[in-house]
Image (cartoon, rainbow, N blue to C red):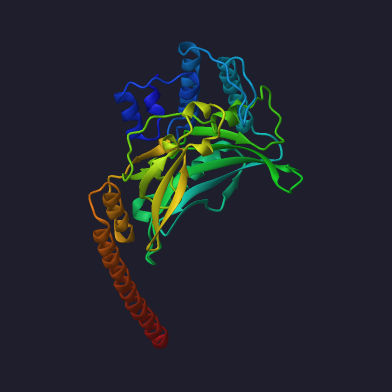
Amino acid sequence: MNIYDFFNSPDVAAHCQSINHKFNAVEAAVMVSQSRHQSLAEKHAAYKTIIAEYPDMELPKGNNHGYHASFHKALGDLIIYEECILEKFRIVEPNTVYQAAFKEKCDANPKEEYSPARGIYPSYEKALADALEYAKEQYSPENNQDEYGIPPRTLLGISIRKIYTDRIDKWGNNVYVEVDISENGDILSVGHHSEINLPQKNDIDAWLLSIYIDVPIPFKRGNLVEMSGGGGWMGDVYVLLGTCRDYAEPNIKKLYRYDRDDMTATIYYENEGSVFSEVTHFYPDLCYCRREPKGETRILKYISLHLKGELGLCELLEVQKFLMLDRQMQKCKDHHQLKWQLDQISDDLLKS
């Protein structure tokens, strides 16, 4: 098993490999669990390799998990647990249907969101076939922008849910079992409603997705970065200010006890001509942004140069002034273009 195959960021993987960083069993399992491109079967194979080849260790009690004397045993239980969920998902049962939803990000609104669920099917195979066909039709480059200029959408994931139509929880929602799949149809992860009873339940599944670990990164203050796989919700390009690894508190105090939400990076991002600072989670998913910023995000390039000492403050302010004027000119251009289109529509209506 090559642990770096499971990293979402090729830049972080290359850096850790170049410095010969060693991951223990816990850290390796967390990085495997976070992978967005490896299938569940590949993750389970990697977990089995970790159990066989990495030294066992205990887990101290943390915010989201209890004490485990043997991490190997907990990881083995997780494999059994997720295989039980998968079996439950695939079995056709009375009073159940399957439905797909698509997680997407629109260029006009970088926030991730699910599109409305599509179709009702009697089996997983039929729901999967339709979901893959629909994704190919709707998110392919040639079909991703219509004649009205609706901005392109990026497909981030597909979810298929098995719904129990005769089982409702106290909030009025249907009980379910679900899987996330890739565009190739591979199952990436599994999940279920809290009222689904399964054997071998422990807290290790939630723990792997929330634990704090320390991962070396190559990025420096002022670098232009993005979230690997287009997973960012605050835009596509960021200027890095720092990460939790820069904090005064020693990382050793956080290991295995803090949350994934504490694995933060502080960034600048642009939105409608303004620049904001924000915190993004799980910094190991960052990668270098190798694309030239366009439009209003161009300001981030110059902020990056300023933070790296390559552009003075006065020069940065001059650039900002120019970009603001350019934004105003573009608005005027768009206004005249819209007015022309409305005039054309009015003429067409009068002629009809």
Q: Quadrant of residue 350?
A: bottom left
Residue name at image x 41 percent, y 36 percent: 246
The percent coordinates of residue 13 (x first, y second) are: 35, 29
Seen from this angle, which residue lies furthest bottom?
Answer: 350
Q: In the drawing, does residue 305 fall left or right of residue 101?
A: left
As rendered, which of 219 and 163 lies closer to the eye? 219
The quarter of the image holding the N terminus is top left
* Image position of 62 with respect to 143: above or below: above
Q: Count the marks.
A: 0
The percent coordinates of residue 316 (x first, y second) are: 27, 59
Q: In the drawing, does residue 19 fall left or right of residue 148?
A: left
Seen from this angle, which residue lies furthest front?
Answer: 248
The percent coordinates of residue 273 (x first, y second) are: 37, 63
Q: Quadrant of residue 107?
A: bottom left
* Image position of 38 with respect to 306: above or below: above
The quarter of the image holding the C terminus is bottom left
Residue name at image x 74 percent, y 43 percent: 169
Residue name at image x 49 percent, y 41 percent: 129
* Image position of 212 with respect to 154: above or below: above
Q: In the drawing, does residue 126 fall left or right of residue 314?
A: right
Seen from this angle, which residue lies furthest right?
Answer: 170
As rendered, which of 4 and 37 lies closer to the eye? 4
The percent coordinates of residue 196 (x first, y second) are: 70, 33
As rendered, which of 206 and 338 lies closer to the eye? 206
Residue name at image x 57 percent, y 22 percent: 79
